[in-house]
Amino acid sequence: MKRIASLLLVSVFAGAITLGAYKLFFEKENFTIISQENNGGVVNASYTPTSARGAGINEVDFTIAAENTVNAVVHVKNITISKTPTTIFDVFYGTGRSAVPQVGTGSGVIISSDGYIVTNNHVINKATQLQVTLNNNRTYNAELIGTDPNSDIALIKIEPKEKLPYLAFGDSDHTKIGEWVLAVGNPFNLTSTVTAGIVSAKARNLGKNQSFIQTDAAVNPGNSGGALVNTNGDLVGINTAITSQTGSYVGYSFAVPSNIAKKVVQDILEYGNVQKGFMGISPAPVNTRDAIAKGINNIDGVFIELVEEESAAQEAGIVVGDIIKKVDEIDVHKYPDLTGYLSTKRPGDTLEFVIDRDKELLKLPLVLKERQALVVPEMGLEVRNLTEHDKKVYKTTSGVKITGVPERYRGYGLSEKVIVKVDDHEIGNIDDAYTAFGSISKYGKTVIVMVGSNGERDRLIFQ
């Protein structure tokens, strides 16, 4: 018994000595820093080290943005009725054609709780019936409110029985290259699909002086009209296009910036059409022999080659040879930077331009005007409104001046003439011309009355 007690006592002393040695020689002190101000106890304590570089790629959280977005993105079905010949006789005589429904699909984004939905124009183009399916599988017939083919934006409306989840437009001007974004849509009829990527570039031009956000978020057929959102869930773009030789995603996708889509929607709701503000300039083409010879091919900015008479640019004091460097707070490196920003503005808006004139930076205010020129449908003539000088030269107060003629009409002496009448339509301005030429029949004759530079009138008949 005494032996057991002795062993126990030795064990206790050995443990105490071991613990004391560890505390003395090995354990480091752990401090908690406490700061206290006079007005109360505020404790700042830190026990874990943090990286000075911030959150890494694995720490980015997409779940909240995805959860807030999927219920506001819808499936859009476009039903068109086309007549196809059923026999060989139908091909030659045009009889007995059968109506065949064709179905196209895409996506859309709910932008108000009462059922307004923004999508792409090409998703709903030529539709005889539109159907919208929500994320909860409820289906509604949709009404077309308005479209803008130039920006490829359309606005449609459903009549829900309850308030719907929706997305608010974000500010696409402040998106940054390298910023994380999510693409949400319905590729290949796979509803509520979310893909992630980054903003690869801004102000991309795909051939029509448009300005797209480029991303590497996977987008495929059916994604058109869907949402591009940032990690806060803000709508920064409407997914529109991919560039691919296969028709499927290969690493590049493009979205209409939200600021452009928002302005188009507001114009459709307020005016019934899109209000566009114009400067009245033409940039010097780049990547050409002439541009290289003039030394303007690598200029950072927009080199102005032409300023239209009585345009907003001329009234602001902008001249040929000026280089646009900035508009408001937007840096201008290339022409799509400028056109993209102008697409968010209306006639009457005042902008501040920073231009480089002979290596001197100047600030010029500019008030945008309505469009002064366009290409009319059917014949493809380029026409512009008359200036005060034109009215004196041509001795007319109304009409439109022909400034461009397609190759097939070059032999008719149309160039530099003023059109004053098309069939029964009196022409006062370019909007009248657009309407008149749009109503021309392909199978009838068209009578155009024109005025020459000395005031004489010509009358041409086109079959």
Image: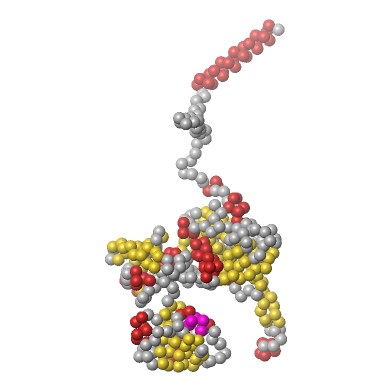
Q: Quadrant of residue 372?
A: bottom left
Residue located at (53% from left, 82% from top): 438
Q: Which residue lies most toward the top here?
A: 2
Residue 318 within the magenta-colored segment of the rendering: no
Residue toward you, 391 or 436: 391
Residue toward you, 451 or 261: 451
Residue 124 in the image, given as x and y percentages of width and height = 61, 71
In-image side of 187 versus 401 (left or right): right
Residue toward you, 159 or 461: 159
Q: Quadrant of residue 373?
A: bottom left
Confirm whether residue 400 shows in the render: yes
In-image side of 44 versus 84 (left or right): left
Residue located at (62% from left, 11% from top): 10
Q: Is residue 60 above or below residue 235?
A: above
Residue located at (62% from left, 14% from top): 11
Q: Quadrant of residue 98?
A: bottom right
Q: Is residue 4 above or below residue 170?
A: above
Confirm whether residue 289 shows in the render: no
Residue 292 in the image, given as x and y percentages of width and height = 34, 70
Dominant SS in magenta? helix
Q: How is the image coloured?
A: secondary structure
Residue 304 in the image, given as x and y percentages of width and height = 35, 70
Magenta region, residue range: 432-436
Q: Is residue 216 above or below residue 425?
A: above
Residue 145 in the image, given as x and y percentages of width and height = 59, 70
The quarter of the image holding the N terminus is top right
In-image side of 89 versus 426 (left or right): right
Residue located at (31% from left, 62% from top): 361
Total residue callouts = 0
Q: Is residue 401 above or below residue 47?
A: below
Residue 433 within the magenta-colored segment of the rendering: yes
